[in-house]
Image: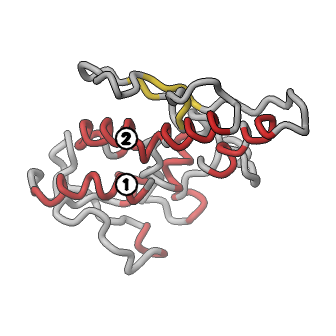
Amino acid sequence: MVAVLGCALLPVWSVGTHEPGAVSGTGAVAPLGGTCLTCHAGIEEMHPGYRLSCVDCHGGDDTAPGKEQAHVQPTQAVPNDERVLPAGYDLTYQRFKNPSNLRVAMEVCGTCHEKTVRDVLKSPHATTAGHLGDGFYEHGVVSGKRPTYSIFPVKDEDGEVPPEAIAATTQVPAFRAAGSRSRIETHYSDLPRKACM
């Protein structure tokens, strides 16, 4: 997904519509790295042509003298298993760990690239609606071929939805331990949350 978002934004970056060194919406010069570069010296420039600081994308405090104060700390216990985190799970920490996480992409990248992020969020790569729909149908979890589930809930609200397109999907529901253990659909309904998200 990181690659999809990065590739989707690449044409916008190369256009050079922003004045280098300016922070979107403020006109201020971005402090490039602050204390972040004390430990992360030599890290590649993530946004050529438009200078952003580490905290512009990751959050945190680039004026803090130490790692514990500079880094965003989780406010909730982070599960160390295969569960997919709920959509709103500690978004500040998720942003710190991965600013291109699609759960925070609109907040991080959408400030300048709103249309691109909206398009990415509705893309087959981001939603995996086709992949999930096929699997759920083929394994008897749903009765129809038209996808209804996606990694993130999505609603197409930017105009007419073509007949072959999907107007909306809902997020894959939490696993329900109901059904016969001998039936594939009982087990398959939990697989996408572990393997795809």
In percent of width and height, residue 32 lies at: 29, 64
The answer to whether residue 158 is left or right of residue 187 is left
What residue is shown at x 9% (from left), y 51% (from top)? Answer: 17
In percent of width and height, residue 113 lies at: 24, 43
What residue is shown at x 54% (from left), y 57% (from top)? Answer: 71
Q: Nearer the viewer, residue 118 or 90?
A: 118
Q: Which residue in the protein does label 1 denote?
A: 4
Q: Nearer the viewer, residue 153 or 34?
A: 153
Residue 144, image quadrant: top right
The answer to whether residue 70 is left or right of residue 142 is left
Q: Nearer the viewer, residue 151 or 61?
A: 151
Q: Which residue in the protein does label 2 denote?
A: 123
What residue is shown at x 64% (from left), y 47% (from top)? Answer: 74
In percent of width and height, residue 143 lies at: 63, 24
The answer to whether residue 106 is left or right of residue 26 is right
In percent of width and height, residue 174 lies at: 71, 31
Q: Residues within 10 Å of mark 2 (few under 14, many from 20)?
A: some
Circle 2 sits in a helix, a strand or a loop, which is it? loop
**Are the two marked residues, 2 and 1, in contact with CB atoms closer than 8 angstroms?**
yes
Q: Amino acid at mark 1?
A: Val
Q: Is residue 107 visible?
A: no
Q: Amino acid at mark 2?
A: Ser
Q: How many marks?
A: 2
